[in-house]
Image (cartoon, coloured by chain):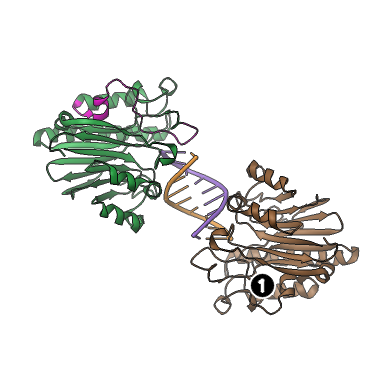
Chain colours: A green, B brown, C purple, D orange
DNA sequence: CATGCCAAG
DNA sequence: CTTGTCATG
């Protein structure tokens, strides 16, 4: 029995002052994927790294080497990682702090993903689309490798993409918004078609949401005007072992430590 | 009986959240010179301008037209100004939000000055030195005009200059620092020589300080490692009427609303 | 060490 | 609306 969580922390230094440590202390997860860490390891306050270590976490962090204070993904795990891989072999993005894989003891790989945010009709969307192309190839190859070797894998992250009409509050108004463009949804559908399982959607096949991101502007959080863009994709063995999945929506606006909420999947049995 | 104060607020919007309004409500001053307002009039929160008006102040603000969020001087007065003049006729600096004069009813002029900060040996020092030249001419001309017409005048501001060894804690270490360069001190001495009176120094001729600025770094405020760079210069009639002058040092580090403290001069009799 | 600006989200 | 950066103080 174990669990894996993912959370876009929107600046780990800010989140640390607003309750991230309390959340970490209480999560059932044995591995946590973080995105938008927005700090290099040496920029983390000692008080934070000390507290994380005291809670029994191992931290592996892939900051952006290309833009200070931007992006940055990490994996916290209760077990010490055996192998760490930064990027997925794409020279255009490997140093951007967007993808990190750790192999954990027991045959499970946990990956943290921060997929680029696009702006429809701009060069940012072009960059996102290029990432989707190369990352889609990586996801399929990783799936096949797991199938061949018997490993299990979780890819947790901010995918900056709502897969279906269930996954954002105002889908009709957002059909030309990046994150809900037809070709982005088709891309995600093809990933699932290859064999990956969207753990939260598998557990909640018909509900609106649960959303995982709400803009800080206006009353979006209080009115639950959100998007489900943070996903945990799992290989078939973990999909079969899934015992629950959902969003840890903060109890109140004042208790949020990010504009995203953490997403968690729990597994029955040994894994991971 | 009246009083005039000067304060570099280091961002009036930030100062407003930290106690500036309480200080304004309690000051005996009938006119207050502000520097580093760092906002245009339309950028001030309505709650702030409303509170200021409710306290009975008239606000005249000369923001920087050349750099957003920089400089900016203002005068608050209990009486409504009769005339407002921005700059002192120097095309190189008039639009920089560094100098404002208001003529108040009763024959008193109050000016708010934010003299450039220099960095010794750089073009910033060259700009400061050019300002000293043209502003020194203005000060002398204004003094002579007051003498000829019977007006009184107060020039309050951040002069970015400690006039003597009494005016900074570590003068030996700062002999090559901008703000304590020999030619800057000579410039100030020449201003006094022309007839202007440094009100605080006149009241406290022999004391170290009182300092009016302490860097936010380290424990400068708690250890009183400061500089006296905020001055109120007055014409002879007000110098003769001076009943007291000093620095309103905040009671604690936590109660400061700026890295500068307010400086106040009190007058006996009618003026201003 | 704090300000307001900025690009980004 | 919030993040971290930056230039400036």
| Residue A156 image point, x, y percent | 26, 37
Which residue is depicted at the point 68% across and 54% down?
A: B24
SS type, badge 1: helix
Q: Which residues are magenta?
A: A194-219
| In this rendering, position of residue B267 left or right of residue A38 | right
Q: How many marks?
A: 1
The residue identified by callout 1 is B184
Quadrant of the image containing the N terminus of chain A: top left
Q: Looking at the picture, does residue A162 appear above or below residue B230?
A: above
State the image coordinates of residue B143 (x, y, percent, origin top left): 82, 66
Look at the picture and state if A55 lies above or below A201.
Answer: below
To which quarter of the image does residue A43 belong? Answer: bottom left
Q: Please tell me whether the stretch drawn in magenta is mainly helix, strand or loop.
A: loop
Quarter of the picture holding the C terminus of chain A: top left
Picture layout, residue A222 above or below residue B261: above
Badge 1: chain ID: B
Q: Is residue B87 magenta?
A: no
Q: In the displayed structure, would residue B155 be above or below residue A166?
A: below
Residue B136 seen in the current view: no
Pinpoint residue A47: horizontal percent, then vertical percent.
34, 57
Quarter of the figure with residue A190:
top left
Q: Sort mark 1 into few (<14), some (14-19) or many (20+) by Cα contacts within 10 Å.
A: some
Residue placed furthest toward the right = B149
Q: Quadrant of residue A114?
A: top left
Give A103 or A254, whichever is nearer the viewer.
A254
- Percent across and percent down for residue B81 are 81, 51
Q: Is residue A208 magenta?
A: yes
């Amino acid at each position: 029995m174990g669990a894996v969580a993912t959370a876009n922390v929107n600046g780990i230094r800010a989140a640390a002052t607003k309750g991230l440590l309390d959340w970490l202390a209480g999560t059932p997860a044995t591995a946590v994927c973080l995105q938008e860490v927005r700090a290099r390891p040496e920029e983390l306050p000692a008080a934070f790294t000390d507290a994380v270590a005291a809670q029994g976490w191992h931290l592996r962090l892939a900051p952006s080497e290309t833009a200070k204070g931007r992006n940055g993904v990490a994996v916290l795990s209760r077990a010490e990682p055996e192998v760490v891989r930064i990027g997925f072999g794409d020279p255009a993005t490997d140093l951007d702090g967007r993808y990190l894989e750790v192999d954990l003891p027991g045959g499970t790989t946990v990956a943290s993903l921060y997929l680029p945010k696009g702006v429809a009709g701009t060069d940012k969307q072009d960059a996102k689309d290029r990432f989707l192309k190369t990352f889609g190839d990586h996801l399929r190859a990783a799936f096949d490798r797991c199938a061949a070797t018997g490993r299990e894998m979780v890819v947790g992250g901010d995918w900056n993409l709502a897969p279906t009409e269930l996954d954002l509050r105002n889908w009709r108004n957002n059909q030309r918004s990046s994150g809900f463009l037809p070709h982005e949804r088709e891309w995600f559908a093809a990933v699932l078609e290859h064999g990956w399982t969207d753990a939260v959607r598998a557990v909640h096949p018909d509900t609106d949401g649960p959303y995982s991101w709400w803009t800080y502007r206006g009353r979006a959080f209080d009115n639950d005007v959100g998007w489900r863009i943070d996903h945990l994709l799992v290989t078939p063995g973990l999909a079969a072992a899934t015992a629950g999945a959902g969003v840890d929506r903060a109890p109140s606006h004042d208790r949020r430590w990010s504009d995203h909420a953490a997403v968690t999947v729990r597994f029955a049995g040994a894994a991971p």
